[in-house]
Image: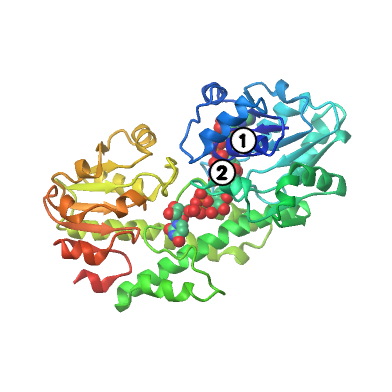
């Protein structure tokens, strides 16, 4: 089989499929990425992925190439290219997807299945099937399926090898049979399968991300309400989460969601709803987005207060650059948004992240970069905890307290032990916990 697009999703999927015993070739247009992968070097940080790739390269089940011709003999082609937000609109940019289909089509001369995994607006699978009918020499032999992916960065390997469910979006039973064969080891191990038609499979993915976004923004809206009413959002969330109908996951308030998926997916979902004449049905997602973006500004405001009303001439230790822990991905990172605002207002944002320093430096070269949390804290007017890396949870507030100019901390991820930090003489503040701020 082939995997087209070797980014966070594609390379994990390629290695995962090889681990299941398939012969896999990963194709990408980025020659540096392919050279690194062929050499067993993963161009980003994802726990456990190096070992998976090294093992499957050595076993001869996994190869990488920049040439679509090398994918010609495969009978299943997984499409994993990016579908980012368009630069001029909230809709998804499908140009990489179209380019991949155009590049693949001339090589398709025998019966095969093209399986989309990228997250797309409903109707995309049907459009790609139409493109293939026109572009492929004997177009009838190619069918299209949609198999959306639910992996999370940071746990991508486990999510691929032990998914919660497999969604098989198919137009006929032949495609379903092929996908059941591809995933046979997982299905035999008990992974539930949901078989759907193509539009349903496409909608399942964007609905899933929209639900998670809504849950996070719900608790962040409650956090705003807590700030006004004197309640504590962490206790509210704990009590809500104990109800199995609500569930405890995705109820962590703070800085809100970022990353390369959720925000762009809820925007693309709304754009598609507008196209289909049902914009009103998903209008609430605009509010979900707005609540989420407000979280970042609310954390900036807490920091501004701690810095005496403005950032000019102040130094803030920014702990975290990745959009979440256990990844080096900084796409739409709330932490870097906050750092950037501090810097723009004349402050020094001294950033430290265990894994994302390289990416952050490249995208935000004008920020200041520290070699450790202590180095970031040296002479700081405030410490901002913005990504919930476990190594930040165990920071000793007494040790850090010796480095800073003023013992001010904003816990944007509700990670730190408020009592411990207050006991060590810090002014601890966190969104949605107003009682701690007096
Ligand atoms: N990252 C995740 O956790 C995740 C999870 C589920 C679904 N998704 C979805 O998967 C898709 C990919 O996301 P990602 O995070 O892996 O993006 P990414 O930007 O990390 O990777 C995309 C890759 O596609 C390559 N590419 C672009 N055009 C190509 C072409 N014509 N042919 C071959 N390769 C091409 C790029 O060079 C890049 O390596 C998106 O639709 C995303 O929404 C991502
Ligand atoms: O209670 C919570 C949970 C998460 N987050 C934030 O939400 C963002 C997204 O987190 P997560 O969903 O774990 O990360 P992703 O790797 O972006 O994964 C999401 O996006 C992927 C791409 O579509 C999907 O495959 C996954 O199922 C979906 O969880 C991060 O910034 C988190 O810090 C919170 O603020 N509070």
Judged left or right of residue 8, residue 4 is: right
Q: How many marks on residues? A: 2
Ligand 1 under 8 Å from disc 2 Cβ? no
Q: Is residue 139 above or below residue 270?
A: above
Provide residue 199's location: percent of width, then percent of height.
74, 53
Q: Is residue 28 visible?
A: no
Q: How is the image coloured?
A: rainbow
The quarter of the displayed image where residue 358 is located: top left
The one of 133 and 356 positioned closer to us in this rendering: 356
- In the rendering, which numbered label is found on residue 157? 2
Residue 24, horizontal then vertical, whole percent: 69, 30
Task: Answer with left or right where residue 142 lies relative to residue 355.
Answer: right
Question: Is there a contact, CB below 8 Å, between mark 2 and mark 1?
Answer: yes
Q: In this orientation, which residue lies closer to the viewer: 352 or 46?
A: 46
The percent coordinates of residue 263 (x first, y second) are 50, 52
Image x and y of residue 94, in percent: 63, 40
- Crowding at dot 2, Cα within 10 Å, few <14 / some 14-19 / many 20+, comes out as many
Q: Quadrant of the N terminus?
A: top right
Check disc 1 and report the residue beneath it: 15
Task: State how far apart marks 2 and 1 are (Cα).
Answer: 9 Å
Labels 2 and 1: the sequence-earlier one: 1
Q: Secondary structure at mark 2?
A: helix
């Amino acid at each position: 089989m082939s995997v087209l697009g070797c980014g966070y999703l594609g390379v994990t999927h390629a290695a995962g499929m090889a681990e299941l015993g398939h012969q896999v070739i990963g194709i990408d247009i980025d020659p540096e990425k392919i050279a690194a992968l062929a050499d067993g070097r993963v161009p980003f940080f994802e726990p456990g992925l190096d070992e998976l790739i090294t093992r499957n390269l050595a076993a001869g089940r996994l190869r990488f190439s920049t040439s679509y011709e090398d994918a010609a003999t495969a009978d299943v082609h997984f499409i994993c290219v990016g579908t980012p937000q368009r630069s001029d609109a909230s809709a998804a940019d499908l140009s990489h997807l179209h380019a991949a289909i155009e590049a693949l089509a001339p090589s398709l001369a025998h019966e095969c299945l093209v399986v989309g995994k990228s997250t797309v607006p409903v109707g995309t699978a049907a459009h790609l099937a139409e493109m293939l009918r026109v572009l492929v020499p004997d177009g009838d032999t190619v069918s299209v399926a949609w198999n959306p992916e639910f992996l999370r960065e940071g746990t991508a390997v486990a999510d691929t090898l032990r998914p919660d469910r497999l969604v098989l979006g198919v137009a006929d039973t032949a495609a379903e049979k092929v996908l059941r064969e591809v995933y046979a080891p997982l299905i035999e191990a008990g992974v539930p399968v949901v078989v759907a038609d193509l539009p349903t499979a496409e909608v399942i993915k964007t609905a899933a991300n929209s639900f998670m976004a809504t849950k996070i923004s719900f608790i962040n809206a409650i956090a705003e309400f807590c700030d006004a009413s004197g309640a504590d959002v962490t206790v509210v969330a704990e009590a809500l989460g104990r109800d199995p109908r609500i569930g405890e996951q995705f109820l962590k308030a703070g800085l809100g969601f970022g990353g390369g998926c959720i925000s762009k997916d809820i925007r693309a979902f709304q754009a598609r709803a507008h196209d289909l004449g049902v914009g009103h049905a998903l209008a609430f997602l605009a509010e979900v987005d707005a609540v989420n973006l407000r979280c970042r500004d609310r954390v900036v405001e807490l920091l501004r207060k701690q810095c005496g009303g403005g950032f000019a001439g102040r130094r803030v230790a920014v702990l975290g650059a990745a959009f979440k822990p256990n990844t080096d991905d900084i796409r739409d990172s709330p932490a870097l948004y906050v750092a950037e605002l501090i810097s723009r207002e004349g402050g020094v944002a001294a950033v430290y992240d265990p894994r994302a320093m390289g990416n952050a430096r490249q995208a935000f070269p004008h920020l200041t970069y520290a070699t450790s949390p202590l180095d970031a804290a040296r002479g700081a007017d405030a410490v901002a905890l913005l990504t919930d890396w476990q190594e930040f949870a165990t920071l000793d507030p007494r040790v850090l307290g010796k480095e800073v100019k003023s013992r001010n901390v904003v816990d944007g991820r509700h990670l730190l032990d408020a009592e411990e930090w207050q006991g060590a003489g810090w002014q601890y503040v966190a969104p949605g916990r107003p009682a701690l701020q007096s």
